[in-house]
């Protein structure tokens, strides 16, 4: 119905068993997680990872955000006073159109204003009785506009919404006349015959305030009784922070159990893409796995990849972790350092392939700092390491050490030479020997330096990006050549 469009929303995160059934799908999903505000360069750095994951069959953050908004919960959109006032003016304009007999245009205008206010329930709570008055008047005008056009079903739905949303109010004969009052009473009698239901809300934080259809209920766990059948807007608030809107269906004679998390509501963002934005890194480390898996389960996804940008092993990196929907322990994880210079696209694509299950890509991806000590090394990486993947790791140090020692010894012998003509009791004719040993040492030293550059430790240990170089401006003009890598 037209009213249904105005009230379209999402069911609660866990409303058994409706949450999963509302969003069927077997494809894995991708979301972001950040310990603090989302970085300004996140789109640019994550783009190649997301593109490769999409080629592997993962649903990206924008599509996941749409699914969450459509089947789980939606943002309690903030609404500036000017925008709220404009919505009220639209509703009032629609009501005047109804009074002048222009019923089709009246219904369109009223629904347009109601959509704005219902999308931002926080704009209707507290000391905003004038806005709630406008919503009530709009629903009356909407119901009567449909009734005058012979659309009895739509008229009844609009009036049912009014009955559910304003249980504490009666229609005034003085303000609205007998017609809406009669329709209101008729609809309420029908609802009474159906019976009533209730909602039992289970919260993870007793300080959280619960609102239903924009009026206050209580804080903490609460049971809301005596509700007429239909869809209710449930949303949370803590202090001056608002959670998300959960549409909950109530059926006559039953209690709908809803498990909501204020912690998840507070960090879940779906504007343009889905991201968990925590206050800090400590909160992200503690809650990211649990919330990511919870979202995957609620959407019916078998697994979830979580991407972010943060420091890993002392360097700013694009990081990722893969979770199955039945475990909060990451099965695969990795990172690609983006400083001192951003590496080529192939590194980001390798991270995506690793997260998608390609162990061969581990050679191009660094392990996560904490997770590396817990997660097993992929079989391909172990084989590469154990079968001579770094044959020069020992030889570079051995040849360099012996070479430098030989150079030092040769120089010492050269300096100690006295040509055999000294009157000392010891003859020291060591010049030729010193030159030979120092020459051999210089050769070994050069070979050791060569081994350092030939040993691609970053590819096998997968801790750092490839050797890189960049020109960096310096104070006073000019530039410095910066070399990056692991030697």
Image (cartoon, rainbow, N blue to C red):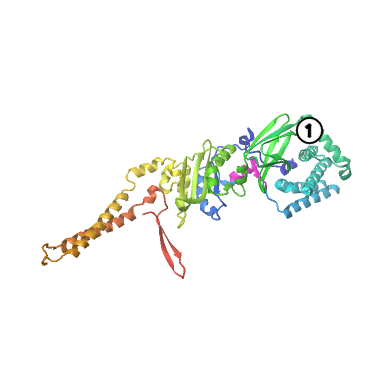
Residue 191 left/right relative to 369? right
Pointer 1: what residue?
Answer: 191
Q: Quadrant of residue 208?
A: top right
Q: Position of residue 231 (x, y in %)?
A: 71, 37
Q: Dot 1: what SS?
A: helix
Q: Residue 47: horizontal and vertical position, in percent? A: 52, 51
Locate the N terminus by quadrant: top right
Is residue 263 at least partly visible in the picture?
yes
Relative height, residue 437 to residue 223 (above, below): below
Span shown in magenta: 63-76
Residue at (55%, 47%) from the top-left corner? 33
Viewer-proximal residue, 422 or 464? 422
- Residue placed most toward the observer, 47 or 169: 169
- Residue 14 occupies which quadrant of the picture? top right
Q: In the rendered image of this protein, does residue 346 appear above or below residue 162?
A: below
Q: x, y percentage for residue 36?
A: 56, 51
| 11 in relation to 447, above or below | above
Residue 357 position, x and y percent, is 46, 41
């Amino acid at each position: 119905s037209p009213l249904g469009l105005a009230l379209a929303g999402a069911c609660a995160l866990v409303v058994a068993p409706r949450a999963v059934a509302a969003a069927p799908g077997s494809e894995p999903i991708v979301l972001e997680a950040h310990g603090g505000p989302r970085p300004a360069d996140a789109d640019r750095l994550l783009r190649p990872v997301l593109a490769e994951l999409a080629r592997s069959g993962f649903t990206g953050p924008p599509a996941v955000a749409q699914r969450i908004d459509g089947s789980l919960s939606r943002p309690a959109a903030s609404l500036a006073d000017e925008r709220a006032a404009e919505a009220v003016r639209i509703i009032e304009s629609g009501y005047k159109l109804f009074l002048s007999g222009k019923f089709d245009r009246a219904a369109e205008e009223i629904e347009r204003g109601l959509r704005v206010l219902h999308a931002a329930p926080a704009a209707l709570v507290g000391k905003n009785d004038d806005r709630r008055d406008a919503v009530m008047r709009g629903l009356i005008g909407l119901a009567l506009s449909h009734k005058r056009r012979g659309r009895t079903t739509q008229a009844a739905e609009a009036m049912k919404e009014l009955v559910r949303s304003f249980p504490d109010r009666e229609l005034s004969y003085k303000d609205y006349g007998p017609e809406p009052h009669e329709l209101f009473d008729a609809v309420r009698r029908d609802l009474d015959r159906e019976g009533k239901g209730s909602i039992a809300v289970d919260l993870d934080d007793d300080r959280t305030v619960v609102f239903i259809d924009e009026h206050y209920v209580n804080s903490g766990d609460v049971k809301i009784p005596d509700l007429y059948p239909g869809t209710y807007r449930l949303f949370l608030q803590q202090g001056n922070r608002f959670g998300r809107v959960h549409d909950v269906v109530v059926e006559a004679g039953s209690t709908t159990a809803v498990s909501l998390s204020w912690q998840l509501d507070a960090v879940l963002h779906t504007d343009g893409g889905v991201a968990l934005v925590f206050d800090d890194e400590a909160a992200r480390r503690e809650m990211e796995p649990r919330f990511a898996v919870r979202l995957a389960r609620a959407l019916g996804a078998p697994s979830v990849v979580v991407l972010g940008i943060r420091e890993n092993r002392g360097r700013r990196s694009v990081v990722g972790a893969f979770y199955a929907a039945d475990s909060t322990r990451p099965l695969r994880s990795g990172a690609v350092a983006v400083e001192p210079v951003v590496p080529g696209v192939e590194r980001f694509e390798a991270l995506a392939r690793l997260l998608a299950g390609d162990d061969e890509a581990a050679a191009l991806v660094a392990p996560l700092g904490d997770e590396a000590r817990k997660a097993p090394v992929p079989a391909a990486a172990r084989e590469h390491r154990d079968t001579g993947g770094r044959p020069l790791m020992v030889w570079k140090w051995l040849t360099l050490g012996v070479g430098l020692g030989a150079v030092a010894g040769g120089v010492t012998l050269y300096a100690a030479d006295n040509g055999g003509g000294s009157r000392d009791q010891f003859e020291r004719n060591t010049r030729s020997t010193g030159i030979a040993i120092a020459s051999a040492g210089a050769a070994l030293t050069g070979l050791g330096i060569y081994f350092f550059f030939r040993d691609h430790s970053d590819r096998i240990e997968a801790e750092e990006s490839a050797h890189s170089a960049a020109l960096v401006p310096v104070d006073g003009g000019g530039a410095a050549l910066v070399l990056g890598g692991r030697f």
